[in-house]
Image (cartoon, rainbow, N blue to C red):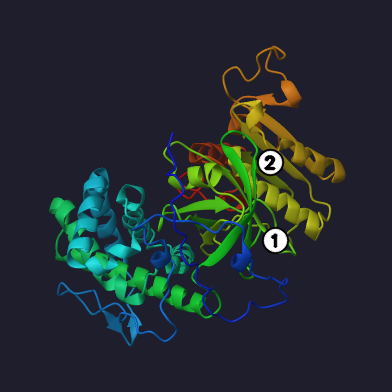
Amino acid sequence: MLVIPAMPAEPPAVPAPPPGPPAAGPVPAMEPLFTHAPGLNWAGPGDDWSRAWSVPAVGEPGPAGPPALPRAGSGPVVADGAELPPTAHDIALIRASLAVVEPVADKATAHFYALIFLHHPEVRSLFPAAMDVQRDRLFRALLQAARSADDPAGLTEYLTALGRGHRKYGTLAGHYGPVGECLVAALARFAGARWDGETELAWRRAYRLISTIMIDAAEGAARSAPPWWQGEVVAHELRTRDIAVLTVRPDQAYPFRAGQYTTLETPWWPRVWRHFSFASAPRPDGLLTFHVKAVQAGWVSNALVHRAAPGDVLRLGPPAGSMVVDHEAGADLLCLGGGTGIAPVCALVEEVAERGAAGRSVEVFYGARQAAELYALEALRRFAQRNPWLSVRPVLSGPGAFMGGPAGGGPGPGGALPGELPEVVARFGPWSGREAYLSGPPAMVRRGVGVLLRAGVPQERIRHDLVGDLAGG
């Protein structure tokens, strides 16, 4: 179990939120509480927490935009002022080189960051001190983007969210050029015989497209939203030994949709961000709710569960995720929530109630290993009693979960069904007319998607945000 360091002696100065235009539409009155909060975060000597929260002054010049990366002497970079996207041949070359690099991705990642920090030490402050937490994320995100170059719509959606989210790290347009050069150099080293002038140009074209979309997204977001929000913890409730429900009040209006997630940073681990889903729909008072499970070696989750307290101040990145309900379509919903993956499901159910069910039904399957881990079950059941369109089925998969319960695989204590969540869902149905929403451990989500596809649910009706560390860290 990770040991959270003791509370140091000196508090940092928490800056005012960055200026920006007000959000569109009516917003609740939000008086920042930070000036009289009972216990603002304290940080230790040398952790640079205050500096990590600083932002450039308005009008302060930053690095110039990225240079034109494509070269290697093969073909033009632009045509009539427009960027040339990667061709089908480029994409084939990219995928062939990826097949060689991916088995040694750890070595390629280490080399990539070594090049960045050696040749561009000015960007080191954008990353956490302990790179074992962060080191493969940027590299793998770039590889994922390049792999998806033949899906313009999906790639644009992915990179737009990535570009907006990178504002919270302090990423500027001028950083993309050096990162691209280091990416190409790392790939060239580890792609072996699959690397030649054509392959290099294909990667440079792909990266130019990637960086352009991300920079445009960041610049667009900067016109209407801050790079990050400050949020004060106003309530902290332990539901189990390792699960806490946190209520956070942002310093200004925070627009999001039920089913989405954000990234959180604590003062105890500067520049280490982790994904957490919103556990409630948007509220008139502006408060945000999160369900957090402390996982082994989870820096942020352990700090939030075992150390955070009312009065502490967190940072929030922009909302992201596409697991939102189309209320105009009015389709019946099927929701699978495993562990703290029930959080966005609770938010979706709450939003359906607020918008009006309009004749739709909502089936919720809520899975855990042991009955004690179904911390949100009673609240969901009370909600279902008030809303007949909602059905909630608990599922238990852990060994011994049904000790003393009925034999033969029937419902156990509290009416829980035995088995792994996806397989239990497969026994019910049919689900072919439903919109499906899945949240929880990645393995559960992947199995659940397979079960639903085999049950006749079209891929486009299955929604999840399978971010690698959404439930961890």
**Is 345 situated above or below 229?**
above
The C terminus, quarter of image: top left
Residue 220 disc label = none
Q: Is residue 315 left or right of residue 425?
A: left
Q: Residue at x 62, y 70 (%)?
A: 252
Task: Name the residue carrying label 1.
Answer: 282
At mark 2, the secondary structure is loop
Residue nearest the viewer, comparing 207 with 58: 58
Picture coordinates of residue 393, whole percent (x, y): 72, 33
Location of residue 187 by image quarter: bottom left
Image quadrant where residue 80 sits: bottom left
Frontmost residue, 219 versus 81: 219
Q: Position of residue 276 (x, y in %)?
A: 55, 51
Give the residue type that dot 1 points to. Answer: Pro
- SS at circle 1: loop
Q: Residue at x 14, y 75 (%)?
A: 73
Residue 331 seen by the camera:
no
| Left-right relation of 222 to 103 | right
The residues tagged by marks 1 and 2 sit, at their Cα atoms, a distance apart of 28 Å
Mark number displayed over residue 431: 2
Looking at the rendered structure, the kind of residue marked 2 is: Trp
- Residue 167 lies, in percent from the top left, at 44, 69
Q: How many marks?
A: 2
Foreground mark, 1 or 2, reads 1
State left or right for residue 367 relative to residue 116: right
- Tell me the quadrant of the picture where the N terminus can be found: top left
Q: In the picture shown, does residue 100 fall above or below 159?
A: above
Category of crowding for the residue at label 2, using alpha-carbon neighbours closer than 10 angstroms: few (below 14), some (14–19), many (at least 20): some
Mark 1 neighbour density, 10 Å: few (under 14) some (14–19) many (20 or more): some
